[in-house]
Amino acid sequence: MSFELIRNYRTSGTNGILRYGSEKICHTIELPWKENQPFVSCIPEGRYLMEKRITHERGFHLILKSVPERSWILIHPANDARTELEGCIAPVSELTGTGKGIRSNEAMDKLLKVFEEAQEKQNHIYITIKEKSTMNILERVKKPTPKLFRKLRTIGLVLAAAGGAILGAPITLPAGLITVAGYLTVGASVLTAVSQVTVDDQVKIPPLPEVKNKGDASPR
């Protein structure tokens, strides 16, 4: 199992929900997305290794490894992304606006507790960052993800196979009768629709050399 951060982008900031499996841990605040520019943008979506660390300034917190073109991206307490963050992620207990929240230290303590429990079960802890989906089913078909593409293709194959299996025997449903022709038509339609859409490639994050430093002096 891994952590998952679901983002909701806005022009003035980025809010999110942080989960571990099915458990909601807290909300998050970040800078707005500005093409991954250091100091002014949140980091790209992707899957990152997380590690726990401690400094005199921040105490215990988390760091994300191998973030493209960024360094020292931390998860640490903050209540206002605009004034307190330079690309890092801040956990908050409650959102008060875009990029703003309260009781961040409380949320950080809860996150660290879940992280430590996860460490007891696995050696490497990852976080997946992605956008909250607001598209309806028609928009998803027009712009599918690889996962949705596979699901639609499977549905089409199942419908086509079901049509052949029933050998033309109609099935009585409240809405009417569905015959083998219906199954085959629907299955073929789904397969045709899927074959005509473009699948977005998943982002592959190249590993960057790890910098060992006791402080947080490197650019973000």
Image (cartoon, grey):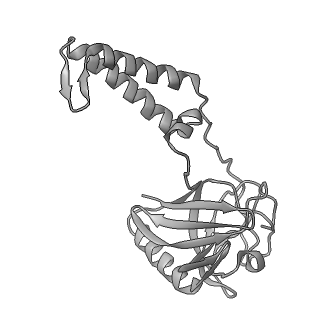
**Residue 43 in sight:** yes
* Quadrant in which the C terminus appears: bottom right
Which residue lies at the image location 66% right of the left edge and 81% below the top edge?
A: 78
**In this rendering, position of residue 143 left or right of residue 13:** left
Q: Is residue 39 above or below residue 204?
A: below
Q: Residue furthest front?
A: 175
Q: Is residue 5 above or below residue 58?
A: above
Q: Which quadrant of the view contains residue 168?
A: top left
Which residue lies at the image location 57% right of the left edge and 22% below the top edge?
A: 196
Q: Is residue 17 above or below residue 111?
A: above
* Quadrant in which the N terminus appears: bottom left
Q: Which quadrant of the view contains residue 31?
A: bottom right
Tag count: 0
Return the residue nearer the eye: 196 or 124.
196
Return the residue nearer the eye: 178 or 54.
178
**In this rendering, position of residue 61 left or right of residue 168:** right
Which residue lies at the image location 55% right of the left edge and 60% below the top edge?
A: 6
**In this rendering, position of residue 172 left or right of residue 15:** left
Which residue lies at the image location 75% right of the left edge and 67% below the top edge?
A: 12
Q: Position of residue 193 (x, y in %)?
A: 51, 24
Q: Position of residue 100 (x, y in %)?
A: 66, 77
Return the residue nearer the eye: 192 or 86.
192
Q: Position of residue 2 (x, y in %)?
A: 46, 59
**Residue 125 in sight:** no
